[in-house]
């Protein structure tokens, strides 16, 4: 059913996937699909990359994505590890915890990063692939039928043309044209505040007393400050009731707010960006309409207190891209694409809710309630100190998938597949680099390939699936579990084989290798649906 009426005088050029929006979410989707050999068009209304930071932190699974793309070394100079996360009130540390230097995915739990650095790398890769980057073109109309999605583009001169794709991804931000064209509503989840975001570039080495990452839990001026990459710093301050946006962004207001121990002077920092952001919590009521999908801010918006907004969008892109790849290659039926929303929407919702909950510690403006909060956080700090590093400050890890493309009733199904250090014939390093990526069966106490009937083995290999055996790293197909990550994981699950999806999630686990054919049969059934 058409979404809207458009001119039909121009025969559309049919791509495999059209992506509307060339921010990080759209970029990653384009790169993943382009690297898989699909023809992609990316539509972006701005003529150039934004080249300023909107976010300042990425988490370990996103760093694993950067590792996969081969850009980790290139962006390293623009990153900075933040060893502590602190909550304070007027300089008094209420709660402090060390950030894990190596988390689930083999990278720090999170690091600060200067966003333009990784966007430039994603853009560079995209332009080496079968992808047309159509910058300076605005999507103004959208229609779809049983075979294609057609989008009308308009340039700065008002000239229009049509392009079409077998599928379309709307990654065009919080004010998404695609979402509005599809008449998809958003659900408001209760958080809505205006905040002033101040980005500065250091003119000299920063003062050693500046906190690297601190939430300012001050009733008179809630805020946050953090080192952002190697040379930049961000301050975020709540815009107070009765304060106009014009007043808040004025230089006088900015430097007044920065006149504090955690702040700065004009001699120390150059202001590179001062803007008002709406910190809000919203989620689209649908993420798919026919051949069109929403991703990133087009599908969800969250307050930044967990630094998960961008990361959630990149998870969307990664999840959707491998599923589109499988369907476009004829390896899977259309029902696989329904699992995108089934998996990603609950995951995003949980992250939004937790982000807002954590933010309540920062935004409390009632002084009596703030004193109660301070006492509560002090008690938590005492508990942390008694635990001697065994308890996390914020015990939130992005949840796994309870439904979707996962083996029914199988232990481990939908959980993250970690990345530890291993050693193989080619050397030692992180699992993905040494053992391989994509569909993988990791096994112990036997040969997984030999445990599969010939037809199942041929099917697995038709997906590009590989086999990894835990053992001595000098044997073909075997890796030594250097840190014991996978041995402990299998002990926890009580299994001898784990079937890993093309992303960083587990399809299912088998108690013994004799159970492996049953899991592969279920995978094959779900792929064919």
Image (cartoon, rainbow, N blue to C red):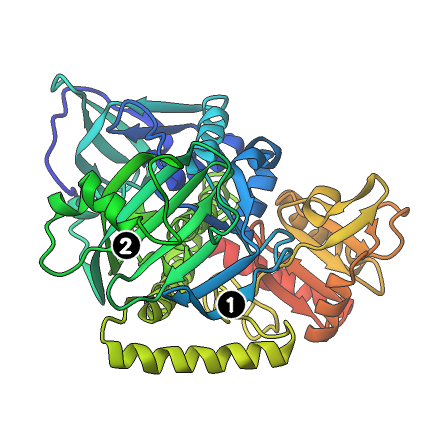
Q: Quadrant of residue 148?
A: top left
Circle 2 residues within 10 Å: few <14, some 14–19, many ≥20: many
Residue pointed to by mark 2: 237
* Local secondary structure at mark 1: strand
* Residue at horizontal 50 percent and vertical 71 percent from the top: 395
Residue 447: x %, y % from top left: 83, 58
* Residue at horizontal 12 percent and vertical 31 percent from the top: 6
In this picture, residue 345 sits left or right of residue 489: left
Whether residue 457 appears in this view of the structure is yes
Instruction: Work out how far the residue at label 2 is from the one at label 1, CA to CA, in angstroms.
Output: 20 Å
Contact flag, marks 2 and 1 (Cβ < 8 Å): no
Whether residue 21 appears in this view of the structure is no
Q: Quadrant of residue 134?
A: top left
Residue 145: x %, y % from top left: 23, 40
In this picture, residue 197 sits left or right of residue 385: left
Q: Which part of the image, by quadrant, shows the N terminus? A: top left
* Local secondary structure at mark 2: strand
78 versus 440 height, above or below: above
* Residue at horizontal 55 percent and vertical 81 percent from the top: 383
Residue 171: x %, y % from top left: 31, 42
Residue pointed to by mark 1: 96
Answer with mark 2 or mark 1, whichever residue precedes in sequence.
Answer: 1
In this picture, residue 473 sits left or right of residue 227: right
Residue 93: x %, y % from top left: 46, 68
């Amino acid at each position: 059913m058409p979404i809207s009426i458009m001119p039909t005088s121009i025969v559309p050029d049919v791509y495999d996937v059209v992506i509307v929006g060339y921010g990080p979410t759209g970029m990653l989707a384009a790169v993943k699909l382009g690297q898989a050999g699909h023809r992609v068009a990316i539509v972006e209304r701005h003529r150039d990359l934004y080249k300023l930071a909107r976010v300042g932190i990425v988490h370990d699974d996103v760093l694993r994505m950067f590792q996969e793309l081969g850009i980790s070394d290139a962006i390293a100079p623009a990153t900075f590890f933040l060893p502590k996360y602190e909550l304070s009130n007027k300089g008094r540390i209420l709660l402090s915890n060390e950030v894990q230097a190596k988390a689930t995915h083999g990278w720090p739990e999170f690091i600060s990063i200067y966003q333009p650095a990784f966007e430039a790398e994603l853009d560079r890769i995209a332009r080496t692939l079968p992808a047309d980057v159509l910058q300076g073109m605005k999507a103004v109309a959208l229609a779809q039928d049983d075979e294609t999605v057609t989008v009308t583009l308009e340039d700065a001169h008002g000239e229009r043309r049509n392009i079409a794709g077998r599928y379309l991804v709307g990654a065009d931000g919080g004010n998404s044209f695609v979402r509005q064209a599809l008449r998809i509503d958003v659900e408001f989840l209760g958080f809505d505040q205006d905040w002033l975001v101040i980005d500065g570039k250091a003119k000299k080495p920063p003062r050693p007393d500046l906190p690297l990452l601190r939430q300012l839990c001050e009733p008179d001026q809630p805020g946050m400050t953090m080192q952002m990459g190697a040379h930049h710093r961000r301050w975020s301050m709540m815009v107070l009731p009765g304060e106009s946006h014009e007043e808040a962004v004025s230089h006088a207001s900015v430097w007044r707010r920065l006149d504090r121990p955690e702040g700065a002077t004009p001699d120390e920092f150059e202001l590179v960006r001062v803007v008002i952001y709406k910190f809000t919590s919203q989620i689209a009521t649908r993420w798919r309409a026919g051949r069109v999908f929403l991703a990133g801010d087009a599908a969800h918006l969250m307050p930044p207190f967990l630094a998960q907004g961008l990361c959630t969008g990149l998870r969307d892109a990664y999840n959707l891209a491998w599923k589109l790849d499988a369907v476009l290659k004829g390896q899977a039926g259309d029902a696989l694409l329904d699992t995108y929303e089934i998996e990603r929407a609950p995951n995003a919702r949980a992250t939004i809710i937790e982000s807002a909950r954590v933010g309540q510690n920062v935004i409390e403006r009632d002084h009596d309630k703030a004193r109660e909060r301070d006492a509560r956080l002090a008690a938590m700090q005492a508990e942390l100190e008694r635990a001697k590093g065994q308890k996390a400050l914020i015990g939130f890890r992005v949840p796994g998938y309870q439904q979707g493309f996962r083996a029914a009733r199988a232990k481990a199904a939908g959980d993250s597949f970690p990345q530890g250090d291993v050693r193989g014939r080619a050397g030692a390093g992180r699992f993905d680099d040494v053992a391989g990526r994509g569909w993988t069966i990791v096994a112990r106490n036997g040969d997984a390939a030999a445990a599969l009937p010939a037809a199942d083995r041929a099917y697995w290999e038709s997906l590009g699936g590989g086999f990894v055996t835990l053992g001595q790293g000098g044997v073909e197909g075997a890796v030594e579990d250097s840190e014991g990550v996978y041995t402990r994981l299998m002990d926890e699950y009580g299994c001898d084989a784990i079937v890993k999806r093309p992303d960083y999630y587990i399809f299912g686990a088998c108690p013994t290798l004799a159970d492996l054919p049953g899991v592969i049969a279920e995978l094959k059934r779900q792929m064919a649906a």
